[in-house]
Image: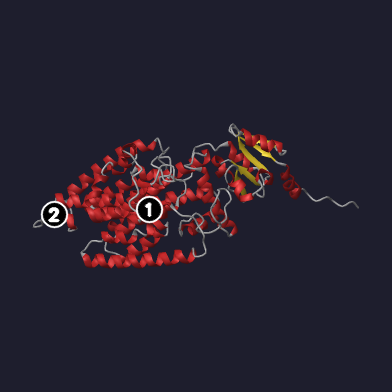
């Protein structure tokens, strides 16, 4: 029994190191305000914070959207889990910890999938290396907080469950995957096509997928029945497909500097497992046909979270494809090589698996080296120990009372989310308040925004602190805060 469990210490240790390393980098990005998008991250945090601490889904930091669980038009049941975690430790660090932690858990099904399809512990190590040392997935995991990313480990787990012929495991993984966002829900029946063991088992898997999808659709519809939301990119593209395939918006340059990296160093083996690769086709098509700057980018420091399903299924298919390749190279006695291509696998010899696993680890590690510096990663064995010095603005706003009404520019949005009444000037302030700067107690103004500085000064704003990039101005309305905290006068005898 112990000998059977011992190999699983490898993916557990790998998941822990993965989490500690990426979580520390994510916390460092928050402290230095070098997140992917402060404005978008702040909107997510404010929605989750208000529900966790005040019981409503309202947000004021971002223009548009509604005070609802489906605030952005997307449907993510993981928002409830995120709010529960946030309630225990309020702050953006909690959200990035949740995201990097869940992605790190994908090391476990990647190890299991490799062990099942390639064979033995060596196959498990190969699968673990391909997942844990995949640079593009690191970049996706560091996308601040994006609920679409949370489905990655469960998509890999769903494929693993199918390869293990566990319909219960597939259903559980499918629910957790589909709960991440609606894009994952529609992939579940397609994932079921990857079930091995003949068409009987494949039909059973398809039935399980349809039941799971139906359950998720019913829950999502019920929870969102009263929402008047926004059209998501997936809805827009799906509608466009009905009128004909939208034109490809990407170029060969995008392939060379972005898409091609999803195939290295060994992920081209994904094409040997087309049924496992297929569920990512929809997300890939949407990415190809959406213009740059529409919230879906082909820039590594941009909005690349929409590639999360593509990364998940490329990795799962690549691991499975290595199983096809090893079985094709080392067919069992009496079996034709082509059987490996239709799912009739035979394990490679133990020595070949061990040598192959070592070669795969070295190849993945060599490829991953190029990602370490650009993503600011440093090997860590404990989370949250970022050595990045926090920006001065964090201390500047921390001294203000929680009841203050404050605004800043979109770049600094994350700095003021802890205030329930917070806005972004030039963006949400005018739309949400209808009155503008006069409603505020404080304004954190970027020095380059000279017109805003002049307007706040004209309203009676006085300097209350400054940094190299921002000036904190106190407006006359802040007097109410001081009056509320002033000690009551002692009556004369």
Q: Secondary structure at mark 1?
A: helix
Q: Nearer the viewer, residue 208 or 133?
A: 208
Q: Is residue 121 left or right of residue 92?
A: left
Mark identifier at residue 240: 1
Residue 234 vertical position relative to residue 208 in the rendered view, above or below: above
Residue at 32%, 48% (x, y): give it: 131
Q: Answer above or below: position of 226 versus 394.
A: below
Residue 354 in sight from this viewpoint: yes
User: Is residue 11 in sight in this rendering?
Assistant: no
Furthest toward the left, the residue is 334
Residue at the spot x=14%, y=51% of the render? 330
Separation (CA) of disc 2 from disc 1: 40 Å
Work out whether residue 161 or residue 310 is closer to the camera in this orientation and state it.
310
Rendering coords of residue 352 (x, y %): 18, 47
Which of pointers 2 and 1 lies earlier in the amino acid sequence? Answer: 1
Relative to residue 34, is residue 80 depicted above or below? below
Q: Are marks 2 and 1 in contact (CB under 8 Å)?
A: no
> Circle 2: is it few (<14), some (14-19), or many (20+) Cα within 10 Å?
some
Task: Name which quarter of the figure residue 338 lies in.
Answer: bottom left
Residue marked by disc 2: 338
- In which quadrant of the rendered image does the N terminus lie? bottom left
For the rendered model, the colour scheme is secondary structure
**Of the pair 450 and 97, the residue shown nearer to us:** 450
């Amino acid at each position: 029994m112990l000998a059977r469990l011992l190999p699983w210490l490898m993916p557990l240790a790998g998941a822990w190191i993965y989490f500690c390393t990426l979580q520390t980098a994510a916390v460092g990005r928050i402290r230095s305000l070098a997140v992917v998008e402060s404005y978008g991250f702040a909107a997510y945090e404010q929605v989750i914070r208000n529900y966790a601490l005040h019981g409503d889904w309202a947000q004021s930091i971002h223009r548009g959207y509604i005070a609802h669980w489906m605030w952005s038009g997307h449907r993510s049941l993981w928002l409830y889990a995120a709010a529960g975690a946030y309630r225990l430790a309020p702050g953006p660090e909690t959200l990035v910890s949740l995201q990097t932690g869940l992605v790190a858990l994908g090391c476990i099904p990647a190890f299991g999938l490799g062990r099942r399809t390639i064979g033995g512990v060596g196959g498990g190590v190969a699968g673990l290396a391909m997942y844990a040392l995949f640079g593009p997935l690191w970049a996706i995991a560091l996308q601040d907080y994006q609920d679409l990313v949370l489905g990655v480990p469960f998509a890999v787990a769903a494929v693993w469950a199918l390869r293990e012929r566990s319909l219960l495991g597939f259903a559980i993984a499918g629910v957790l995957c589909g709960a991440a966002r609606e894009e994952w829900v529609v992939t579940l029946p397609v994932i079921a096509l990857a079930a091995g063991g003949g068409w009987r088992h494949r039909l059973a898997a398809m039935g399980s997928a349809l039941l799971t999808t139906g359950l998720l659709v019913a829950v999502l519809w019920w929870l969102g029945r009263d929402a008047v939301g926004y059209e998501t990119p997936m809805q827009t593209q799906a509608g466009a497909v009905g009128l004909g395939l939208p034109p490809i918006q990407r170029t060969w340059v995008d392939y060379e500097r972005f898409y091609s990296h999803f195939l290295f160093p060994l992920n081209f083996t994904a094409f040997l497992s087309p049924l496992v690769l297929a569920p990512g086709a929809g997300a890939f098509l949407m990415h190809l046909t959406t213009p740059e700057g529409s919230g879906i980018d082909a820039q590594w420091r941009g909005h690349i979270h929409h590639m999360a399903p593509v990364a998940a299924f490329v990795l799962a298919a690549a691991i499975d494809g290595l199983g096809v390749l090893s079985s094709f190279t080392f067919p069992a006695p009496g079996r034709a090589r082509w059987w490996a291509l239709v799912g009739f696998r035979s394990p490679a010899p133990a020595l070949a698996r061990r040598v192959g696993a070592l070669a795969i680890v070295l190849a993945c590690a060599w490829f991953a080296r190029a990602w370490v510096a650009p993503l600011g990663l440093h090997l860590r064995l404990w989370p949250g120990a970022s050595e990045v010095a926090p920006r001065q603005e964090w201390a500047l706003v921390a001294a203000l009372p929680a009841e203050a009404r404050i605004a800043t520019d979109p770049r600094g949005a994350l700095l003021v989310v802890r205030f329930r009444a917070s806005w972004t000037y030039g963006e949400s302030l005018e739309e949400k308040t209808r009155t503008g700067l006069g409603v505020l107690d404080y304004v954190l103004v970027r020095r380059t925004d000279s017109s805003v500085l002049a307007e706040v000064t004209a309203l009676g704003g006085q300097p209350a602190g400054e940094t190299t990039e921002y000036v904190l101005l106190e407006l006359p309305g802040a007097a109410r805060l001081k009056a509320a905290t002033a000690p009551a006068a002692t009556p004369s005898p």
